[in-house]
Image (tube, coloured by chain):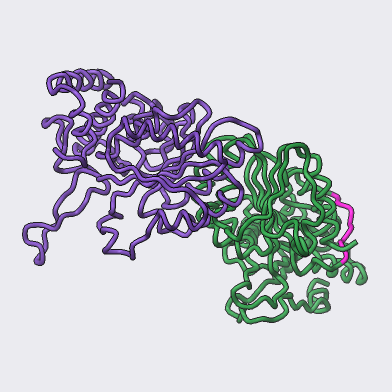
Amino acid sequence: MKYVEFINSAVKAKVSQEEGIVLFGQNISAGSCLSGLTRNLNVGKDGLIINTPNCENTLCGVGFGLMMSGTNSIFFMKQQDFLLLGIDQLVNTYNFMRRKEPDASFTIMAIVVDSGYEGPQSCLNSFADFCSIARVPGFAITNKADAEQILNSELVSPGFRLLGVSQRLFKTDIIELPTVFASQDCSIFQYSSGKDATVVCLNFSFPYGVELGDKLRKRGMEPSLFSVNALTPVRWDKIIDDLSRSKKLVVIDDCKSVHCSRDNFLMHVHESCSLKKKVIIKRDLSADLVSPSLDRLEIDYDEVVAHLT
Amino acid sequence: MDLAKQIIRVRLGQMMVNEKYRNGEFKVPIHLALGHEAIAVAVDSMMHDNDRLVLTHRNIHYNLARAKTLKPEIDEYMLLEDGLAKGKLGSMNLANEAKGIVYTSSILGNNLSVAAGVALSKRVKKEDGMVIVVTGDGAMEEGSFYESLAFLKSNNLPLLVIIENNEWSLATRIHERRCPINIKAFAEALDVNYELFSSNDVYEYVERLSGLREFVLKNKTPLCLEVKLTTLGYWRQKSEEFPDGKFINYHAGPAPNVSLQHGPVIETDQSDPVFVINKCFDEKIMEAVSRDILVELKSELP
């Protein structure tokens, strides 16, 4: 099953049980239905599905208005960069709302444009920057296990958050790996436990980490593999504990964000651990990140493996 | 007489806030709404229990009209625990859910879409009542004004959009900052009805607002209500070009030329709702009413 097909089926299953929920967004029930993300959605009793006009700022405000009136809603968005038009609502209206424990849920689920060919104005693989602007909770969905937990606990739950799915992964096979640990707040997932290296994936980097893990195992190494799905800083204890044993760290982060939890994590590592080996795989933010080109991290896995062994 | 008393109460309440403001008792910025009392009192009078009100940074008139007391508002401006919002909102975001004021935004144009969401929620929950959102001639220049009206009309949501048009945004008049916008034509382009209030007569406003409420709910449609008014409390900005001072309409902060000592009337013409209401009654009766209300308001404060 493809990544987008699995997420679509999980969303469908979740919202079909929800009474009085409002699903809205542009073309969510027409045409390709956001490349299949929102295809064939149905809602429970008294719910609504609204194909809206093109008015992102207003749609963000509508979601907060629904939320403050006790009505759950999800705003599905074709490209996360459109959310720039709603920044006022994300910051100012959310700051008003966050004073109180909310009764209702408002989720913005957006496709993060990380395929690379949409042009300069859509070259915004910067989910963490959206979250950092007003400390908005955000979660990246990268595989079957995290999709199941994040959609079950965050898609419809009192409060506000952003959920991001990767355009680059849409037509790839969904990765199915069992977890050995999943934090209740959906911030950190662990997929393997080993003594030889700690591999930490952020944003939508998990497939790279899986590939690296396979190559390390072929060389006889046993890595721990983590995915950090929360876009704002989280408790790092679980990873730091693992790293204290392995002393070898690989961080993979495919985002273009300036304000991201990777830096917060590395600061904690610096304060807590003495490392024997460290590999940081991330974007060169001084490079041309806006011209149309494959938005993919180029990783020399053999070199990484050689460095760790 | 109840409506007249309310007008006087909202006016004197603001004037007392102004006195304290001038004395430097508030840290939060406050936008007084002297001259806006008629529409605020009329909206308060028209609102039903299930109606919801969404406000903007200039909200003191609606908050005073809805709360009917002064001390919690002043305590809020002082950021005290006894304040209307426990000192968490200050002035420009001051809401009062117990009185139906569910959201107040300090950002121009921000509140229209939130109000649309509140109206949509009413439909989902099959709740009675209408949503009223207050905006202004400055905020209607924002793209969100157009977006929100299009969303409201597209979804047949009953909502009254009150555009308080005082002609000014900060220190510039409309003609100094933009082309004219014909709100009636603009609304009609979206198949949205339009009404105009300009008399500052609270009795006329109450009667017409009740009719508009019925129309909006029956026809499940937004409606734009433009209210032409004057924000009283001007000042003069001296410069080489204007040695006697250029007229600048009041925007925010203490109103330097307004004083409780002169009574509740600020301008002796139709721009002042207190002047308008006073003409409906005997002068001596209104003087006594004003005195009594001022004593009541002062008794609320330590």
Judging depth in this view, the residue of B80 and A248 nearest the camera is: B80
| Image location (x, y in percent) of residue B153 | 56, 50
A72 displayed left or right of B70: right
Dominant SS of magenta comes to loop
Residue A203 or residue B28, whichever sits in front: B28
Magenta part of the chain: A173-180
Residue A258 location in percent, x, y? 57, 66
User: Does residue A178 belong to the magenta stretch?
Assistant: yes
Q: Measuring 66% from the left and 48% from the top, which residue is drawn there?
A: A107
Residue A145 visible in the picture: yes
Which quadrant of the rendered structure holds the N terminus of chain A? bottom right
In the rendered image of the structure, the colour used to display chain A is green
- Say left or right for B178 vs B222: left
User: Is B4 or A90 nearer to us in this picture?
Assistant: B4
Q: Colour of chain B?
A: purple
Q: Give how far across and how far down residue B68 sits, in percent.
A: 35, 24
**Whole-percent x, y for residue B265 in the image:** 16, 33
Picture quarter with the C terminus of chain A: bottom right
Please give left or right for residue B120 compared with residue B163 in the image: right
Left or right: B262 with respect to A50? left
